[in-house]
């Protein structure tokens, strides 16, 4: 198979981690007879520095014409980087939001799985971890607060900022269907997370989820309030199979879920449109605090590349191979600094990538 990928290395650790994911893809391609061709495009700070805007129309066209997009992460230190002196629509994150919307990437899948090998890196007590956990967060990605109208104005001489949170039933239905479809292939349990005790958008969310659930009699479901969910993730993570939630709640809960797998450097993600098209990126950011030091964990990005093989190209065997290679390297005791524990062997970003490639070869 020939896969035509648009690649966004991005900012901070982005170039380091994407380079390793591309090398892993090439190793898989060599073994199984696939070719991955890469067209690099600029987004985020890297694009601002060259073009004065975070995503040009030309770059967007290349992404649209690709078979799938592989991405690192964008952005800088939001307190100190000059990018954050620019108007909001010219900052790095605006490029990512424009790309998600323009490509119709409404379904963000973020799997939070605790490898047995990483139990010592998990901050939870052994009794809470038990025999581990394996959940998927289904985050709605092109609606809600991120895409509502916003403005800042003076009201009677008082600075006032407004962000609007709006969802229509179609936006809720399509992500709910994806969540129930995925649950059907897993442990058949959906927990839909909302704030229906306060928000109208959450009350509509609940109503639509209940309608969708009627078509999935083999899948059990419940509703959970988001504040309780944040608590339950660290109190009893084993209760979760599929978490279905809106954009902002999913952003926050997925960072929390990542940490109980050992590190945010482990959490991959797929952002899917209708059909086979998707963008694949780690859930974490550009980690400006560790950029350029060859210490970032590339595993989230490498596992995102595996998700790409599975979801966009139906290359399940090849995706399994990457996932097995990651597990084998962890079993051999190799760790980047974020997942380091006593008695393990510390490696950098490049070395971690190479160890995974060596398992594939
Ligand atoms: P972050 O995820 O970049 O970093 C949070 C902490 O996790 C830092 O201590 C960092 O060193 C660590 N970390 C993150 N990824 C790691 C990895 N692979 N290996 C080891 N450690 C890792 O979050 P932040 O500091 O809040 O944000 C930094 C920038 O990233 C901001 O500009 C933000 O907007 C952007 N961001 C981008 C994306 C994206 O491109 N999808 C996602 C989240 C944040
Ligand atoms: C993520 C990031 C983005 C989000 C930012 C960079 C806009 O935090 O992908 O989780 O909030 O969606
Ligand atoms: Mn986030």
Image (cartoon, rainbow, N blue to C red):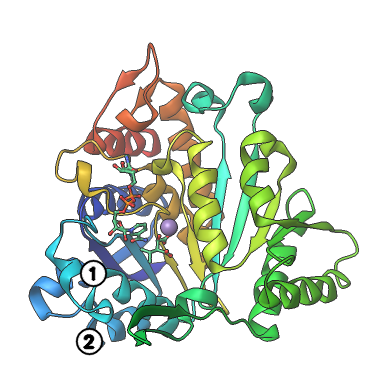
| Camera-nearest label, 2 or 1 | 1
> Is 96 on the left or on the right of 220, as rendered?
left
Residue 197 vertical placement versus 118 (above, below):
below
Find disc 1 in the rendering and name its residue.
Answer: 44
Residue 32 vertical placement versus 258 (above, below):
below
> Is 62 on the left or on the right of 2, as rendered?
left
Q: How many marks?
A: 2
The x, y position of residue 276, in whole percent, is 53, 74
Find disc 2 in the rendering and name its residue.
Answer: 58
Quadrant for the C terminus in the image: top left
Q: Residue at x 21, y 44 (%)?
A: 289
Identify the residue at the far top of this view. 343
Image quarter for ligand 3 equals bottom left
Residue 346 vertical placement versus 103 (above, below):
above
The answer to whether residue 182 shows anywhere in this view is: yes
The x, y position of residue 291, in whole percent, is 18, 46
Front residue (pair 243, 30): 243
- For label 2, count other residues whose C-alpha is less than 10 Å away and answer few (under 14), some (14-19) or many (20+): few
> Is 353 on the left or on the right of 216, as rendered?
left
Would you identify the image quadrant in which residue 89 lies?
bottom left
Front residue (pair 186, 137): 137
Q: Residue at x 23, y 35 (%)?
A: 295
**Disc number for residue 274:** none
Q: Secondary structure at mark 1?
A: loop
The x, y position of residue 348, in whole percent, is 24, 32
Quadrant for the N terminus in the image: bottom left
């Amino acid at each position: 198979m020939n896969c035509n990928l648009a690649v966004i290395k991005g900012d901070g650790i982005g170039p380091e981690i994407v380079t390793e994911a591309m090398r892993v893809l090439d190793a898989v391609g060599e073994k199984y007879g696939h070719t991955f061709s890469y067209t690099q495009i600029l987004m985020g700070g890297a694009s601002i520095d060259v073009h004065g805007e975070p995503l040009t129309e030309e770059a967007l066209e290349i992404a649209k014409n690709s078979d799938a997009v592989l991405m690192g992460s964008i952005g800088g230190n939001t307190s100190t980087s000059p990018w954050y002196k620019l108007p909001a629509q010219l900052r790095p994150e605006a490029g990512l939001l424009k790309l998600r919307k323009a490509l119709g990437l409404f379904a963000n899948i973020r799997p939070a799985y605790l490898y047995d090998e990483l139990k010592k890196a998990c901050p939870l007590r052994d009794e809470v971890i038990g025999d581990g956990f394996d959940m998927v967060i289904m985050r709605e990605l092109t609606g809600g607060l991120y895409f509502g109208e916003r403005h800042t104005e003076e009201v009677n001489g008082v600075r006032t900022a407004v962000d609007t949170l709006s969802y229509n039933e179609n936006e809720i239905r399509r992500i709910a269907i994806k969540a129930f479809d995925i649950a059907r292939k897993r442990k058949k349990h959906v927990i839909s997370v909302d704030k229906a005790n306060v928000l109208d958008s959450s009350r509509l969310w609940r109503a639509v989820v209940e309608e969708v659930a009627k078509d999935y009699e083999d899948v059990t479901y419940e509703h959970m309030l988001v504040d309780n969910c944040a608590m339950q993730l660290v109190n009893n993570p084993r209760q979760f199979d599929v978490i279905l939630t809106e954009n902002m709640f999913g952003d926050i809960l997925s960072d929390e879920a990542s940490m109980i797998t050992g590190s945010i450097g482990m959490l991959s993600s797929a952002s899917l449109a209708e059909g086979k098209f998707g963008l694949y990126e780690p859930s974490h950011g550009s980690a400006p605090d560790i950029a350029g030091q060859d210490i970032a964990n590339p595993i989230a990005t490498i596992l995102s590349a595996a998700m790409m093989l599975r979801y966009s190209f139906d290359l399940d065997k090849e995706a399994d191979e990457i996932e097995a290679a990651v597990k084998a390297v962890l079993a051999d005791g190799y760790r980047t600094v974020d997942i380091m524990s006593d008695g393990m062997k510390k490696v950098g970003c490049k070395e971690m990538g190479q160890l995974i490639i060596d398992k594939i070869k």
